[in-house]
Image: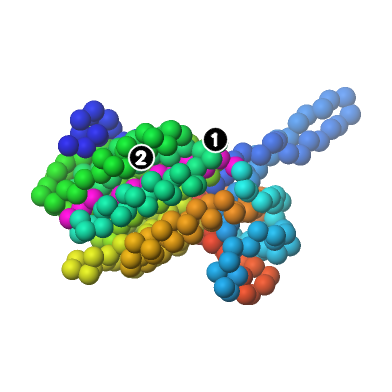
Amino acid sequence: MSLWKKTGMQCLAVCAALALAVPALPQAQTQSQGQTPVIKTEVTLVNLFATVRDKNKHVMTDLKQDDFKIFEDNHEEKIAFFSKEMALPITLGLMLDTSGSEQNNLGAIQDAGSRFLHRVLRKGDEAMVLSFDSDVDLLSDFTDDRSILDRAISKARINVPGGGMIAGNPGPVGGQQITGTALYDAIYLACGEKLNGEAGRKAVIIVTDAEDEGSKTKLEEAIEAAQRTDTVIHILLVVDPRYGGNVGVAHKLADETGGRMISVRSEKNLEEAFDQISEELRSQYTLGYYPTNNAKDGKFRRIKVEMNNNDLKVLARKGYYAPRS
């Protein structure tokens, strides 16, 4: 029985506030003789975290602001803020697929996952651990205690699909019977409930074959939950040949949120994949801009980050939701 069922906790609806955006200080002021009326203009600074690799897949750590270009809905924007992020705290979610299709891989996944958290977490960072099959289980809430996280990972158990219930949750995840693998529900819950209130850099690393069977949440709703909470999704695609996997879904989840999809075919590949994610999380650039389109219409704005050097490939999220007035 999942933690959500046992405690009766209800999932909060995905935050409607703009992901990726933080309010800037009031802008222009005007003065007239005898009085000093103030005209305030609320401007939103859109922040992006970007990782750049060269054609040999080496992470680039010595780039400058002039190396980047940002476009919002095909309109080039002026970069107003730039920095190299090596120490900004990270809030992580490690999500383990414990459906029957991962039965032969779980032991290796647990070992590699524990080592990954020990390598990547530094002072000020926190992580949580979830498992998902026909239910979504919170094995550990956010903590910086490695021993608690290790115990949580070791508690993950394969649940042969047979039906379960995620009860009482609002939004797409309602009180429904589900069977199989609730991947989209798990993403929706992780982002909409757990990561929604967290600040700074946020990422989830999902070890899965990306097959979803039984979620009430749709793929697009899971992606939107991540986008609205500024959460990057990294997928380590671990596929049992007997069951297959969904490469297209894995790519879409990662691409639309600024993450990476890595296919894993052996225990060695799994270690290497975790190492790649760890390196990227510690080698990011922060780019900020004030969007030319300042309409508060709540619509999705598509972002594209380009490099002046065509031999470099940048990894960054693909957009954000504008605030509503």
The residue carrying pointer 1 sits among few (fewer than 14), some (14 to 19) or many (20 or more) residues within 10 Å by Cα, namely few
- Residue that numbered label 2 is attached to: 150
Tell me if residue 90 is in the magenta stretch.
yes
The foreground one among 222 and 119 is 119
Mark 1 vs mark 2, foreground winner is: 2
The answer to whether one can see residue 207 in this image is yes
Q: Position of residue 165 (x, y in %)?
A: 16, 41
- Picture residue at 50% right of the left edge, 47% below the top: 120
From the viewer's perspective, is residue 120 above or below residue 148? below
- Picture residue at 12% right of the left edge, 47% below the top: 163
The answer to whether one can see residue 257 in this image is no
Magenta part of the chain: 88-100
Q: Position of residue 92 (x, y in %)?
A: 44, 44
- In the structure shown, which secondary structural element does the residue marked by tag 1 occupy? loop
From the viewer's perspective, is residue 264 above or below residue 310? above
Q: Is residue 197 left or right of residue 53?
A: left
- In the structure shown, which secondary structural element does the residue marked by tag 2 occupy? helix
From the viewer's perspective, is residue 46 above or below residue 101? above
Residue kind at label 2, given as amino acid type: Asp
From the viewer's perspective, is residue 314 above or below residue 299? below
The foreground one among 8 and 238 is 238
The foreground one among 255 and 321 is 255
Q: Position of residue 279 (x, y in %)?
A: 53, 55
- Residue that numbered label 1 is attached to: 124
- Picture residue at 26% right of the left edge, 40% below the top: 155
